[in-house]
Amino acid sequence: MIDHPSTLETFNDEAGVFDSQGKYKVAMQSYERALAGREKILGRDHPSTLETVNSIAMVFHHQSIQSAIKCLFVPFHGIAVLPLTMEDSCNVVDYTKC
């Protein structure tokens, strides 16, 4: 079952491995799967969901995409809507308009 918490943890762990190898696009795909499932099953405020958000921010940080990091955290303050994909982040200039 793809939405089982253990499966979502596996996606998150897999993404961490790809991130550490510099395979950022593949890492983002796994993190996005984990985040979507965790938000659905556990909710936005659950520590595991927030762990994935932090991990996505680190992928952007590793690539020096600071505007995407700001944009990513805005939704968790009730201002915008996730998900923000890696492709979206490349076009973000004004993070208040995500």
Image: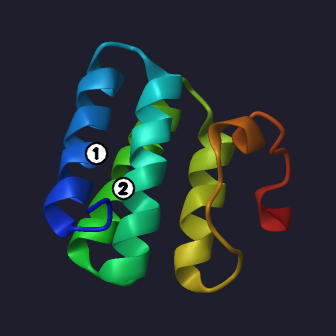
Residue appearing at x 32%, y 59% in the figure: 2
Image coords of residue 75 (percent x, y)? 61, 74
Q: Pointer 1: residues within 10 angstroms few (<14), some, or many (20+)?
A: many
**Element type at mark 2:** helix
Q: Amino acid at mark 1?
A: Phe
Q: Please name whichever residue, 15 or 61, is drawn nearer the observer in this view of the structure.
A: 15
Please tell me which residue lies in front, 42 or 62.
42
Label 1 – label 2 distance at C-alpha: 6 Å
For residue 33, above or below residue 96 = above
12 with respect to 62 (left or right): left
From this view, report whether residue 19 is shown above or below residue 55: above
- Quadrant where the N terminus sits is bottom left
Image side of residue 31 versus residue 65, left or right: left
User: Where residue 57 sits: x, y (%)?
Assistant: 46, 46
Q: Which residue is mark 1?
A: 11
Residue type, numbered disc 2: Ala
The residue shown at (71%, 75%) is 80
Q: Which mark is residue 34?
A: 2
Task: Name the spot of residue 11 as percent of width and height, x first.
Answer: 28, 45
Residue farthest toward the left in the current orientation of the protein: 6
Q: Residue at x 65, y 54 (%)?
A: 84
